[in-house]
Amino acid sequence: MARADQLLASYRRHVSLTPRASLPLSQRVWFIVYPPEDERRMVNRIPEFEIATREHGLDWHHLDLTGVFADWMDTFDPDERTDILAAPRLTQKYATKGLTALVSNRVRTAMQSVPSERADGTVLAISGLMDLYDFTQVSAVLETVENLRLRGILALFFPGEREGNTYRFLGARDGWNYLATPILTEG
């Protein structure tokens, strides 16, 4: 069985369990972990994750962050954008606050679009995390979501690896410890 098929089967098992809104957010975050080289395959399979979610009576809301870096760069005037891109350290400095704020706003908007009466039974799936690499961290996105008090389940399509409770984004960054529920190919 292909890795994507195994991951979908693992997801089906997780989504079949009744989510409890009373759990702290850290226990309602699901990391759908796969090797970075499978990113394109996983993006193409996201509709199958939505179907699996809906089959178990939960709502689905998908936020794709693909292109978010370009969208953020478009907020600068052309001369400033050229200066920022010419200096990688400057880009990183600006992105730490600016890009994280843009992503935060997108997550907030996605959450607000979910009807409050269905919020506890909604999976907010976020994909396109690769666009954050080198500019902001996935952990910053999680901090944003924690501050927004998400009521449902947060599912992150995470290109990277997991060892224990430590996640490494794209297998390249130092990992960080997070108490999310991992959804892995090995079940």
Image: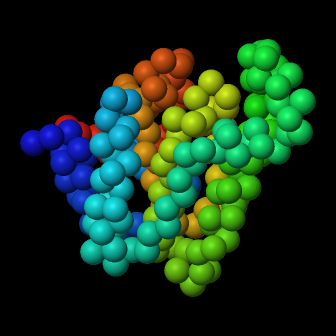
Q: Residue at x 47, y 57 (%)?
A: 125
In the foreground, 85 or 125:
85
Which residue is outermost to the left?
A: 1
Q: Residue at x 83, y 31 (%)?
A: 81
- Rendered view: 27 above or below 119: above
Q: Residue at x 82, y 20 (%)?
A: 90
Q: Taking 103 as reference, is 93 left or right?
A: right
Which residue is outermost to the bottom?
A: 117
Q: How is the image coloured?
A: rainbow
Q: Residue at x 31, y 35 (%)?
A: 38
From the top left corner, tell me how far across and down residue 43 is, in percent: 38, 48
Q: Taking 18 as reference, is 26 left or right?
A: right
From the top left corner, tell me how far across and down residue 186 is, in percent: 20, 38
From the top left corner, tell me how far across and down residue 184 is, in percent: 28, 40
From the top left corner, tell me how far across and down residue 178 is, in percent: 51, 36
* Residue 100 appears in view: no
Q: Locate residue 32: give its quadrant.
A: top left
* Residue 102 appears in view: yes
Give the quadrant of the N terminus: top left
Q: Locate residue 31: give its quadrant.
A: top left
Give the quadrant of the C terminus: top left
- Rendered view: 108 above or below 181: below
Q: Locate residue 59: give its quadrant.
A: bottom left
Which residue is outermost to the front?
A: 78
In the foreground, 98 or 57:
98
Q: How many numbered discs sit on the rendered protein?
A: 0
Q: Taking 129 as reference, is 37 left or right?
A: left
In the foreground, 78 or 15:
78
- Rendered view: 25 above or below 186: below
